Structure formats: C-alpha cells, structure tokens
Amino acid sequence: MTQFVQTSSARTLTNAVQDHYIPAEAPFSTVVKKGQILRIEDSYGQQAIDTLFYNAQDFSERYSSQDTMREQGAAYISTGTKIISSEGRVMAVMTADTCGRHDTSAGACSCESNTVRFGHYTKYLHACRDNFVLEVSKHGMSKRDVVPNINFFMNVPIEPSGEMTIVDGISAPGDYVELKAEMDLLLVISNCPQINNPCNGFDPTPVRVLVWEGEDA
C-alpha cells in the first residue's frame, strides 16, 4: 500500500498541547481549535476509529459524509481531503495519512445492526452508536445529533456493483492521520468495540489522539 505522508518534524510528543490515550471500546471527545493540527493514531494496527466533527461554536453544523464525498469526487478519505460540514463549509483538511484509505460510507455499528448482521445474541454487545450517544450527551446533544461518520482505518472495498464489505484492516501499528482544523471543532470518537467483523481484527485495542499548535500560530 502506498503511504501518503506530509508531516512536520517540528511536531513531537514533547510539544503537543493535547495527548490523549483512548482505551479499547471507549468514547472520547475534545475541542480542537482553528489552525491546530490533530493526529489520530492507530496505536496497535487494524483498529477502526469512528469519528465525528461538530462546529464547536454551533453544534447544529456537523460533519457531512455526503458533501465530503461529493466535494472530493471520491468514496474514500485520504491526504488532501476536505472535511465538509452540513453547511457546505470546510471543517478540516487531511494533511497526512500513513495508511492510505479511510471509509465514510459504512457508518457506525449499533445494537440493532449487530442483531441483523450477526444474530440476536449480539444485541447487548457494546456498539459505536452507544458510544456516540453517550459522548455527545456530555455536550447537550442527543441521539438525533449523531450523523453518519468517518471510519478512520476501516477497510471497506466497494465493488463495481456498489456492494460494500468490511474486511481485514490494512493499518499497521502506529499508523496515523493528521488534519488541520479550519474552524474550532468538537471532535467525538468511538474507539470501535466491534468483535463480530474484522474491522478491528476481532480484538479492539487502544488508540491515541494528539494536538499541536499550527506552524503559523
């Protein structure tokens, strides 16, 4: 897999302004200010990181998967992708990607979809939609505010027929994406707990989130 990296040697762990460890299966949120650089790291490899963005000043403006794909003319997200909001504005730009392809079509797992796909016994297993609802509730939002998300590091080939299948991830330990915030953002993550398909290698693992000041700050 070709790697797509455009990063800065000036960014180190010692000068990060935020450094977060997200346990396996857990939700997470933080604010990333305009101009800051966000890194989302797949620390152990083959871990789907379900991600949403909201305008930190107005949560009614949030990530739009449809507008993002239309703007790029592509089904996947990688270096150079503009993350587009529901208002048609650029929320962030992906500036580095060591993996090469990220899904924004397959959505988040839920108790209901687990039951349909994998059987009734999976209904009570933890799911990304639960994580999202729990985390956005901390910011005064509800399940109505959870929209279709980005699945960083999730491998979802799309067949010529339009069929999609979640298959083994291609990310290696330490792979990451970096995005430059083009507005103040509320970042919301579900570190995917799915164990019934191979998006996490059937073994959910911790991930890391770092934030740096922009080079022109």
Image: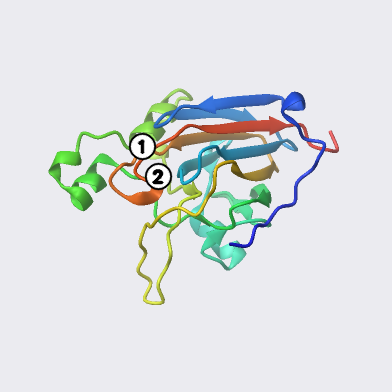
> What residue sits 51% from the left and 64% below the top?
75
Query: Dividing the image into 4 quarters, which one contains the N terminus?
Result: bottom right
Residue 10 against residue 69 in the figure, above or below: above
Q: Residue furthest right?
A: 216
**Mark 1, other Cα within 10 Å: few <14 / some 14–19 / many ≥20:** many
Q: Earlier in the sequence, mark 2 or mark 1?
A: 1
- How far from the left and from the top, in percent, is residue 110? 30, 42
Residue drawn at the location 54% of the way across and 26% of the way down:
21
Q: Residues within 10 Å of mark 2 (few under 14, many from 20)?
A: many
In this picture, residue 33 sits left or right of residue 204: right
Q: What residue lies at 64% left-to-right and 38% top-to-bottom?
A: 39
Q: Position of residue 27 (x, y in %)?
A: 44, 29
Relative image position of residue 5 (x, y in whole percent):
71, 53
* Type of amino acid under label 1: Pro
Q: Is residue 100 above or below residue 122?
A: below
Indicate the secondary structure of the residue bearing disc 1.
loop
Which of the labelled discs sits on residue 200, or is there none?
2
- The Cα atoms of the two marked residues, 2 and 1, are separated by 8 Å
Q: Which mark is residue 163?
A: none
Q: Does residue 119 show up?
A: yes
Vertical placement of residue 118 versus 69, above or below: above
Which secondary structure lies at badge 2?
helix
Mark nearer the viewer, 2 or 1 = 2
From the viewer's perspective, is 64 left or right of 35?
Answer: left
Q: Amino acid at mark 2?
A: Asn
Q: Residue at x 49, y 48 (%)?
A: 150
Whether tag 2 and tag 1 are in contact, CB under 8 A, the answer is yes
Residue 191, image quadrant = top left
| Residue extending farthest left | 120
Residue 57: quadrant of the picture: top right
Residue at mark 1: 193
Image quadrant occupied by the C terminus: top right
